[in-house]
């Protein structure tokens, strides 16, 4: 099929490098990705230390591109933000997650909580709050099984709008977590300003084995427990990191060591094995 604008061949040979070419094509294709049903959600298990089992999953979007193959969000979410597509994609993800939750419920699986990532740009859309609420209501999902992950960089900007939305989502029973905690400029001040339920410590802390990073993780865990917040440690890849994090008494662990993000059917199998014991 012929695409709009410059011919593919012309464009590729016009002196652009492959990276620029790819970005240009992705910018164009992202608009059609939703209607062509090319986005998919993978689910990464989160392990609850005290219960010794998975009780929630993080929804991570991927783009199954017809020409380029599987594309990760690190590449296309920034494009979605630049092109103004992020609002629609954000809605699509929440809807897909709600449908998935209902599908698992219909299969008789005990409900798991699903966390969804929010981009800072989404909070610039005035209707975002109402749109999310109407999707959740329409899909008849119990909001206490939903968690919205907000990055530190989001909390840094348009603070009053973000605060208002956080409060409103929490009043519905949705959990709020701070994602990539510890990577921003004033991590501690966010804990004071924003009523959040969960802190997700950025993977750089666990992957750097220094005494300083370990001390910081311990301090965050202590602080969080006094603030009645839960702590998730992300990016646990090795047995050594796994044992260290369990010993430090964080609430939850997420990372390749426990499981990679999985397509929904594989997640279901993972969950079924756990239920069998
Ligand atoms: P994030 O929210 O920090 O998500 C965790 C990322 O770390 C995921 O990458 C996950 O696959 C990866 N990860 C998990 N365990 C490990 C581990 O043990 N080691 C290492 N090295 N990595 C691990 P992914 O799926 O490529 O997502 C990248 C980022 O894209 C996410 O980072 C999130 O910021 C964003 N993203 C994903 N889905 C969505 C979405 O639906 N909406 C928005 N706005 N952003 C999304
Ligand atoms: Ca996240
Ligand atoms: Ca993170
Ligand atoms: Ca991140």
Image (cartoon, rainbow, N blue to C red):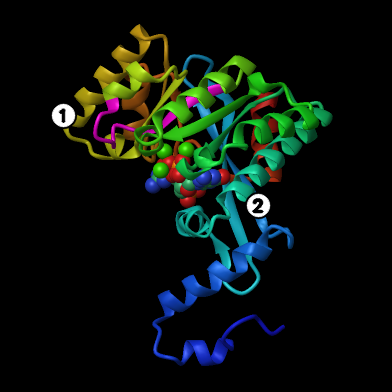
Give the number of callouts: 2
Q: Nearer the viewer, residue 261 or 247?
A: 261
Q: Where is residue 220 drawn, in percent x and y? A: 29, 20
**Residue, disc 1:** 211
Q: Which mark is residue 40?
A: 2
Q: Is residue 176 left or right of residue 67?
A: left
Q: Is residue 126 left or right of residue 211?
A: right
Q: Residue, x 78% and y 32% (percent of image)?
A: 139
Q: Where is residue 1 drawn, in percent x and y? A: 72, 83
Q: Secondary structure at mark 2?
A: strand
Q: Is residue 256 visible?
A: no
Region in magenta: 175-187
Q: Is residue 44 above or below residue 166?
A: below
Q: Nearer the viewer, residue 253 or 33?
A: 33
| Mark 2 Cα-neighbour bin, 10 Å: few <14, some 14–19, many ≥20 | some
Mark 2 vs 1, N-terminal side:
2
Q: Is residue 62 above or below residue 5?
A: above
Q: Residue, x 29% and y 40% (percent of image)?
A: 204
Q: CA distance from mark 2 to mark 1?
A: 39 Å
Q: Residue, x 69% and y 57% (percent of image)?
A: 34
Q: Which mark is residue 118?
A: none
Q: Nearer the viewer, residue 273 or 129?
A: 129
Q: Is residue 65 left or right of residue 96?
A: left
Q: Where is residue 247 drawn, in percent x and y? A: 33, 19
């Amino acid at each position: 099929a012929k695409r709009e604008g410059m011919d593919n061949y012309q464009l590729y040979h016009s002196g652009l490098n492959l990276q620029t070419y790819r970005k240009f094509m992705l910018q164009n294709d992202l608009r059609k990705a939703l209607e062509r049903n090319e986005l998919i959600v993978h689910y990464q298990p989160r392990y609850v230390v005290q219960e010794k089992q998975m009780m929630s999953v993080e929804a991570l979007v991927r783009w199954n591109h017809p020409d380029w193959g599987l594309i990760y969000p690190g590449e296309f979410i920034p494009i979605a933000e630049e092109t103004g597509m992020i609002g629609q994609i954000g809605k699509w993800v929440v809807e897909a997650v709600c449908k998935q939750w209902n599908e698992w419920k219909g299969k008789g699986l005990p409900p798991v909580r699903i966390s969804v990532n929010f981009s800072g740009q989404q909070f610039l859309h005035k209707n975002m709050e109402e749109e999310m609420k109407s999707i959740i209501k329409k899909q008849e999902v119990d909001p206490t099984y939903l968690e919205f992950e907000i990055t530190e960089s989001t909390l840094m900007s348009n603070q009053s709008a973000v605060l208002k939305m956080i409060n409103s989502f929490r009043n519905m029973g949705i959990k709020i977590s701070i994602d990539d905690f510890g990577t921003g400029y004033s991590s501690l001040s966010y804990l004071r300003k924003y009523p959040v339920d969960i802190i997700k410590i950025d993977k750089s802390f666990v992957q750097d084995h220094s005494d300083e990073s370990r001390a910081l993780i311990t301090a965050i865990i202590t602080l969080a427990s006094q603030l009645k917040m839960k702590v998730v440690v992300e990016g646990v890849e090795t047995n050594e990191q796994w044992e260290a994090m369990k010993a430090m008494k964080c609430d939850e662990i997420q990372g390749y060591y426990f499981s990679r993000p999985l397509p929904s059917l594989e997640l279901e199998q993972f969950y079924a094995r756990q239920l069998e014991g």
